[in-house]
Image: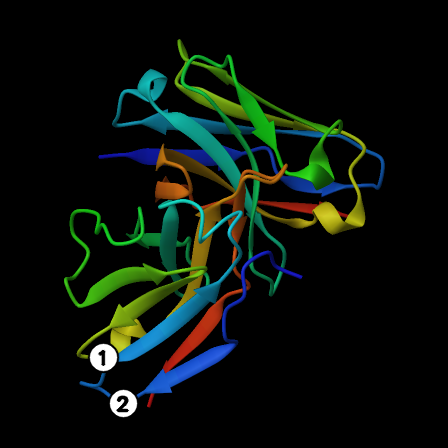
Amino acid sequence: QSALTQPASVSGSPGQSITISCTGTSSDVGGYNYVSWFQQHPGKAPKLMIYAVNSRPSGVSSRFSGSKSGNTASLTISGLQAEDEADYYCGSYTSGSTLEVFGGGTKLTVL
Amino acid sequence: EVQLVESGGGLVQPGGSLRLSCADSGFTFSTYWMSWVRQAPGRGLEWVANIKEDGSEKHYVDSVKGRFTISRDNAKNSLYLQMNSLRADDTAVYYCVREIAWVAFDFWGRGTMVTVS
């Protein structure tokens, strides 16, 4: 069981916007502004899409944005494209004995 | 160009040991925290361990404490993971990753597969 809770799957049509949630506790997501999001295509290494809740690394499309409210962080992808179809993982710093934790992952399907 | 290249994976019996290596180039290795992250077949990501720039601080996920040791050689731009007392649930692809802030893993290697069976 993952420390952070994500929906198993989400879907959307090209051009639409979708949001993936990542729910934790006040000891991780809610307590620190260290939340990241990763995209992983089949057979590939993950790619950092968002860090520090809402910062985008150089080269990541502005269609990807992050936010946080309380113990829940969110990744929003606007103007869905076919190449966005992938697994998405959230990650957070935690005050527990394990310093860094991930969510279980969300499979995004572009219809 | 940043490159992280893992090696050392393979098939090992339960209770055995393996040492993973990660050769890094294209950036000033000695100025970054580094981590190992693993992914069991068909499963999600799990952070395993990280190490401070100068090696003076190390952290581990509870399930590997006392069995795994992370280390680095800044002169060789290399990261290591010594894995002892391996168990079946350690079976995974192990990724070497650069860390720019807590849980901000900005560059990943291609991974090396460890199978404990």
Please tell me which residue is depicted at 37% across the width and 27% down the height of the picture. Answer: B24
Name the residue that disc number 1 marks.
A80
- At label 2, the amino acid type is Ser
Secondary structure found at label 1: loop
Q: Where on the picture, by quarter, is residue A88?
A: bottom left
* C-beta proximity under 8 Å, tags 1 and 2: yes
Badge 1: residue crowd in 10 Å (few <14, some 14–19, many ≥20): many
Are the residues under marks 1 and 2 on the same chain?
A: yes
Q: Earlier in the sequence, mark 1 or mark 2?
A: 2
Please give left or right for residue B64 compared with residue A39 in the image. right
Please tell me which residue is depicted at 31% across the width and 46% down the height of the picture. Answer: A52
For residue A13, the mark is 2
Please give left or right for residue B100 compared with residue A102 in the image. left
- At label 1, the amino acid type is Leu
- Above or below, A8 against A28 in this view is below
Please tell me which residue is depicted at 41% across the width and 41% down the height of the picture. Answer: B109
Residue A21 percent coordinates (x, y): 41, 70
